[in-house]
Image: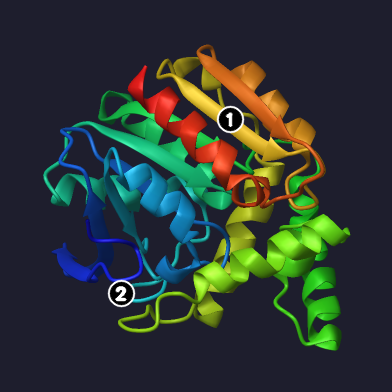
Amino acid sequence: MTTWKDVPTNTIDVDGVPFVYRELGADTEVPVIFLHHFTAVLDDWDPRVIDGIAAQHRLIAFDNKGVGGTGGSVPADLEQMGADAITFIQALGHDKVDLFGFSVGGAVAQMIALQAPDLVRRMVLAGTGPRGGGGIWKMPFIVGGAYAKAALARMDARHFLFFPRTPEGKKAASAYLDRLAERTHDRDKPISLQARLAQLRAITTGGLHAPDDLSKITAPVFVANGDNDLMVASEHSEDLARRLPNSTVTIYPDSCHGGVFQYHETFVPEVLQFLAN
């Protein structure tokens, strides 16, 4: 089977905007659409998570408008990000999908489910919380501090944001970043400054936004996070699960924002079981 390491990058024109995406996995009727995190492009997905889920499901990961190799500009609000994702999904010809949203991708997944409820069968929301969650507006300051530490240490900021600074956490961070480097050809374009700033504005605005009525989302949802997420406080994920009428939540111990990557050997089977139910 083709793996994340060597799957080709495709392009589809959507209303004059070229969207880049990668598609792989089993031939299932309902694909799983991956929505990635702040500043991420296609090459920032953990290959163990991608390949693990693709073993049993058709999987599509894409750059939303203005991100990586996709054209256009990143909008500064989550609702438009959701609308752009819906347009891309429909352009591929899908009328029913599962969503996998990590971090801001989880917020975008919520927007998709609110705007196009008939499109969504199931959702996995990792390292994310509800719009209007208290304290989420502080994330830009947390990210800025982590980037400063990373620059001084000449390290990737995800060492400080995604994983705990414990011996086990440091080991998990290095293993995760090594996995991201496995793909050596046909790599995506890096995130642009415009995209970074627009995403920050969308996250900040979303944190200050009035809470959404998530009781309208009736699709089953699997919520997951680490127990000490510095970017989206872990209690926000628990709050998100309480607001969703048909949800379960798993909080992984001794982990941070990247808990689902640190515990990928446990997380992937749980996702597969959830999607199969």
Read off the residue under disc 1. Answer: 223
Check disc 1 and report its element: helix, strand or loop. Answer: strand
| Coloring scheme used | rainbow
Is the residue marked by circle 1 packed among few (<14), some (14-19), or many (20+) residues within 10 Å?
many
Residue, far top: 245
Residue 131 image point, x, y percent: 62, 37
Q: Quadrant of residue 244?
A: top right
Q: Label 1 vs label 2: CA separation?
A: 31 Å
Regarding residue 184, the answer to whether it shows in the image is yes
Q: Which mark is residue 71?
A: 2
Residue 39 image point, x, y percent: 56, 68
Quadrant for the C terminus, please.
top left
Query: Residue 82 versus residue 260: which sits nearer the camera?
Result: 260
Q: Quadrant of residue 135?
A: top right
Check disc 2 and report its element: helix, strand or loop. Answer: loop
Instruction: Verify CB contact (< 8 Å) between mark 1 and mark 2.
Output: no
